[in-house]
Amino acid sequence: METLQSVETAWSAEFQEGLMAYGGFENMWPEIARVYESRERTTNMALLLGDAQVREWETGETRDVDHFAADSYEIGIRKWALTAGVPKTYLDYDELNIVADKMGDLPDQIQPHYDKLCWDTLFAGFTTACWDRQIFFSGAHPNATDENGAATFSNLIPQALSPAAAEAALIRLKSIRKAHNDDVFNRCLPGKVKCFVAPSNEPLANEIFRPNGAGMPFNRLGGMAEVVPVGALSAHPTYWYLWDSSLNHKPIFLKVNRRMDELVVLDQPRDQNVFWQDEIIAGVVGEHEVAYFHPYCIIGCHP
C-alpha cells in the first residue's frame, strides 16, 4: 500500500520535470503557429483576422468603422489523449523508480505531437482552403495585391529552391499589400525573414542567402533571410517557405482549450483497472485544434 500511495506523487513529479525539459527537443511549431488559449467550444476566427485602419476624421463627419466580423470562419476543438499502462507487479517489487522515469518520458511525446500537427497543416496548405475560400497557398487570394498590381495576390511560387526562385519569393513577400491604401503587410526587417527548408536543402539555401563578406563575390540575396532547417520537412524535401516574422503574424492558428499538462494516475485498489486488470493507468488529455491564419506573411514554394 505504501508503494501505491506514493505512485501518483512520484509520477506527477517526474512528469512535471519532463515538461520543463521541452527545450531539449526540436520545437519548431511555435515559429509558425500562434497559440490561442481559449475556453470557447467554437471560436469565430473572423474576429481575429480583420485590421483597423487609421483614417483622417474631419469635424462633423461620421467616423468610418472597420468591422472585424464581416464573415465567419469557425474553429472548434478536437480531443487528444496520451495514456500508458503499467502492470502493478512492477510496483509491488520496488520498480517504482524505473517506472517513474518512464512517466518522465511522456512529455517527450507531447511536443512532437504539436509539431506534427502544425507542420502537417502547413504542408496541406497547397491543397486545402483557408478562411478566404482560397487554397492557403494560392495565386488568387482576395483583399490584397502584390507586385503584379492585380485585384488579388499570390503567396505561391511553384518552383524548386534556386537563387531565381528565392529572389522571386522575396520580391513577392515584400510586395503583398492592402489594395485600398498600398500599406505593406510585411516589413521584412533585417533578421526577421526566415527560409524554412528540408535538411537536404540546407546547403543550397545557405549558399543562396550567404552573407556578403570580404574576399567573397557579391551576393545580391546575401543576408536577406535566415535559413532554418526543419526536420519535419524531410518528408517533403521539395517544399520550402519564406516567412516574415516582423509583425509576429503566423500562418497557423493553434487553439488550445485544455493543455496536456496534468497527469492523472489511476492507482487506487478500488479503481477498476487495478482491481480487474492488475494495472496502473496514467495519462493526460488535451483539447486543441489547428486552422489557417495569415496567408499574407508566408510564401509557399514547391515545383
Image (cartoon, rainbow, N blue to C red):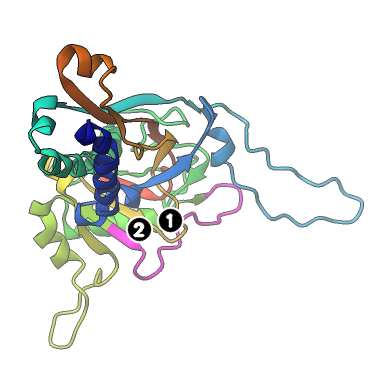
Residue drawn at 29 percent across, 59 percent down? 194
For label 1, the residue is 175
Query: What's the mark number on residue 171?
Result: 2
Q: Does residue 248 show up?
A: yes
Residue drawn at 34 percent across, 50 percent down? 30
**Span highlighted in magenta in the image:** 178-194
Q: Position of residue 87 (x, y in %)?
A: 11, 25
Q: Position of residue 264 (x, y in %)?
A: 32, 31
Alpha-carbon span between mark 1 and mark 2: 6 Å
Amino acid, disc 1: Ser
Quarter of the rendering containing residue 126: top left
134 to the left or right of 15:
right
Amino acid, disc 2: Ile
Residue drawn at 69 percent across, 42 percent down? 66
Q: How many numbered circles are shown? A: 2
Residue 48, compared with residue 167, is above or below; it is: above
Q: Where is residue 106 in the image (x, y as percent from the top left)?
A: 21, 39
Query: What's the mark number on residue 133?
Result: none
Q: Given contact means CB atoms under 8 Å apart, are the residues at marks 1 and 2 in contact?
A: yes
- Residue nearest the viewer, comparing 81 with 11: 11
Provide the secondary structure element on which disc 1 rests: helix
- Quarter in which the C terminus is drawn: top left
70 to the left or right of 192:
right
